[in-house]
């Protein structure tokens, strides 16, 4: 098995080496120009994006023109919310970049068509064939990244790609919440204390193409992987309970990849609800979440949006990335309520043990979280609200 993995690595490295050899980076560097590279998921961007303004307004980089190389998955979000800080966007489709050599070559030529005074990669969990490869190819006076960890990169790859940077910013060798990881990076880079307390989003005016009911709860059924998605049957039970017991209308949300699950929900729910699965863009989803009274969701983008909008959210999680992306620290928000697998629930007082065990991955079965466990959390939250 080890030899097969090694052979696969050699083939992959050889292919990318050939592609990289065809790139002729521009040596022309624009004065006071900066490239930020951020190719991870939507939730990662939400936990990062408020630091862009701090960077742009800092004494150290005031007057710099910023180009953002980002994951096309959150293109609309960034272009709508952050165009005041970002002068130019370059968008990359991760799947195509990984699997299509022609697309990879085309994007690398686009990315390296200009040189920069400074390139920044704030991502803690670096990836060799994505950001690190791009860092190597770009012409820049300075290339600054995080010392990082080994979550998404192998030791031999990191030994190689550490040399692609002119400076690596040290990171604490422990699991810390990702918002604080970003804060750690930028405080060191700027050599100043950052007072930003939490991620926040100011929603622009949006004309929705659909009507929303009064007094509604959002059920967000999506997730980036199957092990992070609670059963549709249980979501339907939650919807029925919220509707019958508390009088909430139900708004179902998710992406186009959740359309089959939305059909399963329809068969299980058998009452009226608003189905927006695959029918909203990210800006519209922000508006839907912002107008909701409560959100019930898998551990995915929706809870990060909810926290940034100061909305109440109940998150169902098998504990994956515990300490990094879940739970939100109480000093950031008091509106985040998590329901974990019982193996985690019984050890909630031992945060360090849980973060060390599940900080990078959890193999616990999310569907061993029962409807009754979520029902208890709903009752606790909604009964407390009645007392307020």
Image (tube, rainbow, N blue to C red):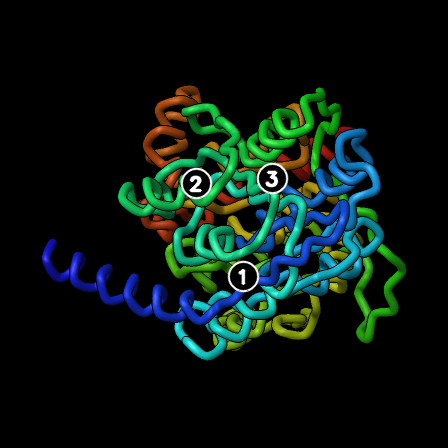
Mark 3 — residue? 379
In the image, which is nearer the foreground, mark 3 or mark 1? 1
- Residue 221 shows which numbered tag? 1
Upstream in sequence: badge 3 or badge 2: 2
Q: Is residue 291 left or right of residue 189?
A: right
Q: Position of residue 252 (x, y in %)?
A: 63, 65
Q: Is residue 70 above or below residue 385?
A: below
- Label 1's element? loop
> CA gap, disc 3 to disc 1?
20 Å
Q: Residues within 10 Å of mark 2 (few under 14, many from 20)?
A: many
Q: Is residue 293 above or below residue 169?
A: below
- Seen at 65% across and 47% down, the residue is 46
- Residue 1 shows which numbered tag? none
> CA gap, disc 3 to disc 2?
26 Å
CB-based contact (under 8 Å), mark 3 and mark 2: no
Residue 149 in view (yes/no): yes
């Amino acid at each position: 098995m080890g030899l097969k993995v090694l052979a696969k690595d050699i083939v992959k490295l050889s292919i990318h080496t050939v592609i990289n050899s065809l790139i002729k980076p521009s040596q022309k560097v624009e004065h006071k120009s900066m490239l930020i590279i951020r190719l991870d998921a939507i939730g990662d961007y939400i936990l990062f994006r408020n630091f862009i303004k701090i960077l742009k307004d800092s004494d150290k980089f005031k007057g710099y023109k910023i180009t953002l190389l980002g994951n096309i998955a959150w293109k609309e979000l960034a272009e709508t919310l952050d165009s005041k800080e970002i002068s130019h966007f370059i968008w990359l489709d991760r799947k195509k970049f990984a699997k299509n050599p022609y697309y990879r070559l085309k994007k690398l030529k686009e990315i390296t068509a200009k040189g920069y005074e400074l390139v920044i990669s704030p991502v803690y969990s670096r990836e060799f064939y994505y950001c690190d490869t791009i860092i190597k190819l770009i012409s820049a006076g300075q290339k600054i990244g995080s010392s990082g960890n080994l979550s998404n990169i192998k030791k031999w790859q990191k030994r190689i790609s550490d040399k692609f940077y002119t400076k690596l910013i040290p990171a604490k060798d422990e699991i810390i919440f990702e918002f604080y990881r970003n804060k750690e990076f930028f405080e060191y880079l700027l050599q100043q204390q950052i007072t930003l307390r939490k991620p926040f989003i100011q929603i622009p005016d949006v004309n929705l193409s659909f009507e929303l009911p009064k007094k509604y709860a959002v059920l967000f059924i999506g997730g980036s992987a199957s092990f992070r998605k609670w059963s549709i049957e249980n979501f339907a039970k939650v919807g029925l309970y919220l509707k019958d017991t508390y009088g909430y209308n139900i708004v179902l949300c998710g992406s186009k990849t959740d359309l089959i699950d939305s059909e399963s929900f329809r068969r299980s729910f058998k009452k009226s609800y608003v189905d927006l699965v695959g029918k909203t863009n990210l800006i519209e989803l922000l508006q839907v979440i912002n107008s909701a009274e409560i959100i019930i969701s898998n551990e995915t983008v929706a809870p990060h949006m909810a926290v940034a909008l100061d909305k109440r959210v109940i998150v169902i999680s098998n504990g994956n990335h515990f300490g990094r992306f879940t739970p939100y620290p109480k000093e950031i928000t008091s509106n985040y309520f998590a329901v974990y697998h019982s193996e985690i629930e019984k050890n909630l007082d031992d945060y360090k043990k849980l973060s060390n065990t599940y900080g990078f991955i959890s193999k616990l079965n999310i569907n061993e979280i029962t409807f009754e466990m979520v029902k208890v959390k709903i009752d606790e939250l909604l009964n407390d609200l009645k007392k307020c």
